[in-house]
């Protein structure tokens, strides 16, 4: 699991991105609203480092972490929620199917599988190397259909990246994303970028327990 949809090689830039992305905590509140995480056993897919596990613990969850490759070997019925952010589990295809099956084995009856990813069609999408509004719209519509057909519901989050000033935003975006960042910054009139995300989530029914 990643803390953001972008991997920045410079640790200082990565830390700055963590500070400006969703300072209101809308992502964590959405995850909690869906799954009621306080007092629950939560498996976070990804490395132990990062802010998401720490934030979920601060909300009262009992959090463990594991990389995606280890999911098939984890104990059955050991978690009330499995949370994955920006992983292969949110990319339709055979790998996602296998990952969902492994997560299902880990969950207890009534447990929740939550997959957070970008929803596109926002300011942040312009930072992607393959940004194309028409293609992105069609891709998201297809992904929505794929998940809904497998019993997932959608929870859309309207979050923000917030900066001290438009000038500070331009400096950071240029340093972190190069020409794409500078192009996005040139269109900014306020020190913020809209970031639309989606949580695909489903509940494990008792009949699915092996």
Image: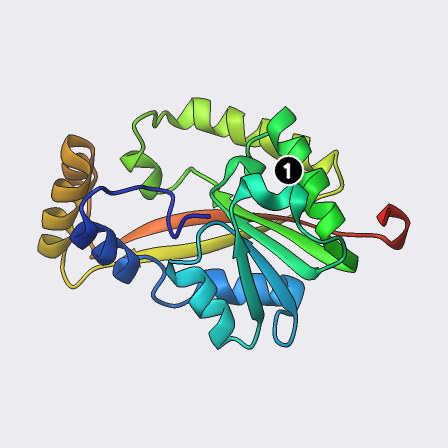
Q: Along the line of sight, which residue is nearer the eye, 168 or 93?
A: 93
Side of 46 relative to 142 (left or right): left
Specify the quadrant of the image occupied by residue 173.
top left
Q: Position of residue 106 (x, y in %)?
A: 71, 52
- Name the colouring of the figure: rainbow
Q: Is residue 86 something one can see in this rendering?
A: yes
Question: In the image as oriented, which residue stretches furthest toward the top?
Answer: 135
Residue drawn at x 44%, y 61% as measured from the top left:
52
Q: Is residue 93 something one can see in this rendering?
A: no
Q: Along the line of sight, which residue is nearer the eye, 171 or 58?
A: 58
Q: Position of residue 103 (x, y in %)?
A: 68, 46
Specify the quadrant of the image occupied by residue 12.
bottom left
Question: In the image as oriented, which residue stretches furthest toward the right?
Answer: 207
Residue position for label 1: 99
Side of 23 relative to 80 (left or right): left
Residue drawn at x 45%, y 54% as measured from the top left:
158
Element marked by disc 1: helix
- The residue carrying pointer 1 sits among few (fewer than 14), some (14 to 19) or many (20 or more) residues within 10 Å by Cα, namely some
Residue drawn at x 77%, y 59% as measured from the top left:
108
Q: Position of residue 16 (x, y in %)?
A: 21, 57
Q: Position of residue 196 (x, y in %)?
A: 44, 48
Side of 127 relative to 38 (left or right): left
Q: Along the line of sight, which residue is nearer the eye, 48 or 95?
A: 48
């Amino acid at each position: 699991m990643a803390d953001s949809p972008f991997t920045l090689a410079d640790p200082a830039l990565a830390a700055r991105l963590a500070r400006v992305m969703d300072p209101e905590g809308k992502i964590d509140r959405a995850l909690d609203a869906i799954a009621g995480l306080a007092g629950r056993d939560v498996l976070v897919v990804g490395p132990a480092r990062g802010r998401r596990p720490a934030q979920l613990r601060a909300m009262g969850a009992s959090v463990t972490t594991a990389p995606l490759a280890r999911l098939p070997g984890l104990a059955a019925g050991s978690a009330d929620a499995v949370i994955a952010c920006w992983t292969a589990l949110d990319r339709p295809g055979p790998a996602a199917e296998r990952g969902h099956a492994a997560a299902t084995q880990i969950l207890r009856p009534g447990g929740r599988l939550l997959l957070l990813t970008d929803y596109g069609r926002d300011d942040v999408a312009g930072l992607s190397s393959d940004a194309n509004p028409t293609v992105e719209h069609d891709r998201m519509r297809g992904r929505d259909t794929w998940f809904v057909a497998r019993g997932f519901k959608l929870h859309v989050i309207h979050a923000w990246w917030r900066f001290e000033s438009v000038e500070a935003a331009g400096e950071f975006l240029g340093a972190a994303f190069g020409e794409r960042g500078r192009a996005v910054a040139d269109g900014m009139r306020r020190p913020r970028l809209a970031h639309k995300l989606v949580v695909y989530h489903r509940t494990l029914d008792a009949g699915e327990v092996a």
